[in-house]
Image (cartoon, helix red, strand yellow):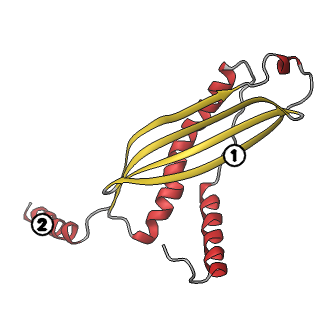
């Protein structure tokens, strides 16, 4: 019993010097949803195969000390030739408490871990709204957010090298 008390006392001292990392989901919510069918009902009579274009974006805001809002935006544009059949834009967001994480790891947590949590909700909402609009659902593919984050980091590094030290923000 005495060993356990000593052990607890030591871990308390260590945690004060090196606080444990915190990563908690506070809330996941649908921030914005838009559906447009600008050429209905005439376009619904078309028998041609539509073209589907899907775009994704990730954004993050520091809303308070250690509290971040991460948003994953999905845009699905479906056209028959040059006429829009439907356009869906959805923004799925999450609020995360992220504390005591090394600065060099924070970007990966916000750019990879958070979107991986939010994305399944976005996929479901987009498929649902398209189905409710009367179309077969469009199921977004799985996304490798690590690869997406790595690509963004490489692009930023290349821009900094190309731009030199001209702009400092």
User: Looking at the picture, how far across and down is residue 63, in whole percent?
Assistant: 37, 51
Foreground of the two, 135 or 7: 135
Q: Quadrant of residue 47?
A: top right
Looking at the image, residue 108 sits to the left or right of residue 137; the answer is: left
Tell me which numbered mark, 2 or 1, is placed earlier along the sequence. 2
Q: Which residue is the site of mark 1?
A: 55
Q: Single out the residue that lies furthest toward the right.
A: 48
Foreground of the two, 55 or 144: 55
Q: Is residue 66 above or below residue 76?
A: below
User: Looking at the picture, how far across and down is residue 79, in whole percent?
Assistant: 82, 33
Q: CA distance from mark 2 to mark 1?
A: 52 Å
Foreground of the two, 7 or 162: 162
Between circles 2 and 1, the one closer to the viewer is 1
Q: Is residue 164 above or below residue 132?
A: below
The residue drawn where x is 26% and y is 70% is 18
User: Looking at the picture, how far across and down is residue 36, in whole percent?
Assistant: 69, 27
Q: Quadrant of residue 135?
A: top right
Q: Is residue 77 above or below residue 158?
A: above
Looking at the image, residue 119 sits to the left or right of residue 138; the answer is: left
Foreground of the two, 164 or 117: 164
Q: Quadrant of the N terminus?
A: bottom left
Q: How many numbered discs sit on the rendered protein?
A: 2
Q: Which residue is the site of mark 2?
A: 9
Q: Which structural element holds mark 2?
A: helix
User: Looking at the picture, how far across and down is residue 73, in whole percent?
Assistant: 59, 43
Tell me the tag on residue 25. Answer: none
The residue drawn where x is 65% and y is 49% is 143
Q: Single out the residue that lies furthest toward the left.
A: 2
- Crowd rating for badge 2 (residues with CA inside 10 Å; few <14, some 14–19, many 20+): few
Looking at the image, residue 36 sits to the left or right of residue 93; the answer is: right
- Crowd rating for badge 1 (residues with CA inside 10 Å; few <14, some 14–19, many 20+): few
Q: Which structural element holds mark 1?
A: strand
């Amino acid at each position: 019993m005495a060993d356990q008390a000593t052990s607890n006392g030591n871990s308390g001292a260590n945690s004060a010097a090196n606080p444990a990392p915190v990563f908690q989901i506070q809330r996941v919510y649908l921030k914005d949803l838009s559906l447009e069918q600008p050429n209905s009902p005439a376009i619904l009579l078309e028998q041609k195969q539509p073209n589907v274009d899907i775009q994704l974006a990730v954004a993050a805001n520091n809303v308070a000390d250690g509290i971040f809002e991460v948003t994953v935006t999905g845009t699905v544009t479906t056209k028959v030739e040059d006429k829009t059949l439907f356009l869906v834009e959805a923004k799925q967001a999450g609020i995360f408490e992220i504390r005591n994480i090394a600065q060099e790891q924070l970007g990966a947590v916000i750019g990879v871990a958070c979107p991986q949590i939010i994305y399944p909700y976005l996929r479901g909402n987009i498929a649902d709204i398209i189905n409710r609009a009367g179309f077969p659902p469009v199921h977004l593919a799985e996304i490798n957010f690590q690869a997406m984050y790595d690509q963004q980091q490489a692009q930023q590094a290349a821009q900094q090298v190309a731009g030199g030290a001209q702009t400092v923000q």
